[in-house]
Amino acid sequence: MFHYRRRVPTDLLTVWEGREVWRSLDTDSYAMALRRIHRIAADVESEFEKARASIGRLADPALIFTTLDGPSISLPWAPPVPQPAPPPPSNRRTIGDVYDRFIADPKHQWSKRTQIAHSTTRKWVVEVFGEETPLTDITREGCRDFVALLREMPKSAHQRFPDMTIKEVVAAAKARGEARLISTANLNAYVNRFGGVMNWAINEGYLDRNPLKGLKLPDPVKKRDKRNPFSPEQLRRIFDAPIYTGCRDDANGYAIPGDQRPRRARFWVPLIALFSGLRLNEICQLEVSDVREIDGVPCFSVASGISRAGDEKRVKTNASERVVPVHDELVRCGFLAFVASQRLCGETNLFPELPFGHLGYRSTAISRWFTRFLENAGAAAPLTCFHSFRHNFRDGLREAKIDRDLALVLGGWTTDGKGTAVADNYGSGYQPRALVEPLNSVRFPTLDLTHLRFIDVA
């Protein structure tokens, strides 16, 4: 049996019994005794320091608390001390959190319509995958299932099936035998928006790859077949309708023959679209000051920004910002006289009677009206709508054999990106005088508008 022996310091003889301290190491093993002696020595030194403190002598606190408050020692037979779980790595963010960060990114300058589209997509994504699901747990197979679910989504689901989850909507549509499903183009739009979130997450370092890449569906409808131009007969019915030949009024009586010939938005907007190629909202948001002479040429100025009234003006693409001369046929119909009268009346907007829709577009109300107008005029046909006027305008440019670059500028169409995009950044573009002749070359020989003319233009 081994023992530890330590002489008592002289300054403690008055409080210690005996001159030596003995402690058993409780072992017959020499190796074990050598290991235990250090702990016993520490205990004894701690007792000496406590004794010094008890008689008012200077003591070392570190030695006193060595055994009482020192770090614990894990013995082989002791239960392990539970350790707190490490915090999750930054790349384990949830899909809900990442989606919210994406939407809040100040780089995104979205219209209200686009904001709603992203919010709808987010709602469906988190319903399918779970808001608290880590982004990195979203698999390729899960994304395929999401696309498969979209293929069964009915049209206008958020309006016709409010307060339902995407799976509930699909089930309800199936129960009703719903055959009106969203188009492939709309489905791919949802996939594009979700995929955009994933690409953004890759750039932010939250994700390594996009599991949605390549999952868009091939669209069976060719792009040029999505809308048709109006046929000559449709155009005749449109511009021979009572609102152009005489109606009761241009409100509820626009389809009823009468002796009134009001010339406001419902009269001018279709004509401007046919002879300028402007999009519906580009026309509806025009201000009086947007119709002006540039180098002696009366022109439409199409641009984004803030209007004089403080309203936001939007264009579809950068190429949409352009100057388009006013077609001679519009001048014959008295359009410039109409603009002058609006200016004299102190109007800011060219068509002040057009209200903003719930998405912030002045075109909302007239778009709905034009659908009813086509029905009343007997001019409705599959694959035709207001946008068909742009197809008529493009066909007019082709038939007049207008140079492709000029046609793209007049219609505000983007280039195809194959060799022309860089060149488009050079120079100041076409001046209005260079665009007058190509624009006025657009003719519709079978369409007779003599009943609308105020003046003749040589």
Image: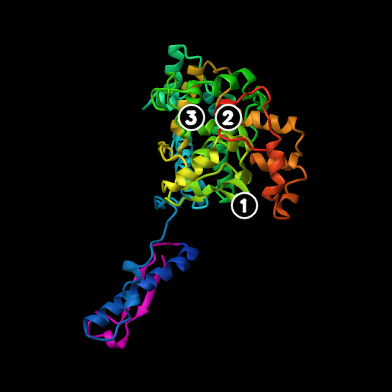
- For residue 77, side relative to residue 272 (left or right): left
**414 above or below 157?**
below
Quadrant containing the C terminus is top right
Whether residue 100 is visible: no
Report the Cα–Cα distance between label 2 and label 1. 28 Å
Q: Position of residue 374 (x, y in %)?
A: 51, 20
Q: Nearer the viewer, mark 1 or mark 3?
A: 1
Foreground: 335 or 36?
Answer: 335
**182 above or below 314?**
above
Where does label 1 land, which residue? 294
Label 3 element class: helix
Amino acid residing under circle 3:
Ser
**Range of the magenta residues?**
1-28
Q: Position of residue 311 (x, y in %)?
A: 43, 48
Where does label 2 land, which residue? 387
Q: Residue at x 30, y 88 (%)?
A: 10
Q: Nearer the viewer, mark 2 or mark 1?
A: 1
Whether residue 145 is visible: yes
Amino acid residing under circle 2:
His
Quadrant containing the N terminus is bottom left
Query: Residue farthest to the bottom?
Result: 10
Q: Position of residue 136 (x, y in %)?
A: 54, 41
Label 1 element class: strand
Where does label 3 land, which residue? 367
**125 above or below 157?**
below
Q: Earlier in the sequence, mark 1 or mark 3?
A: 1
Q: Position of residue 454 (x, y in %)?
A: 55, 34
- For residue 453, side relative to residue 312 (left or right): right
Label 2 element class: loop
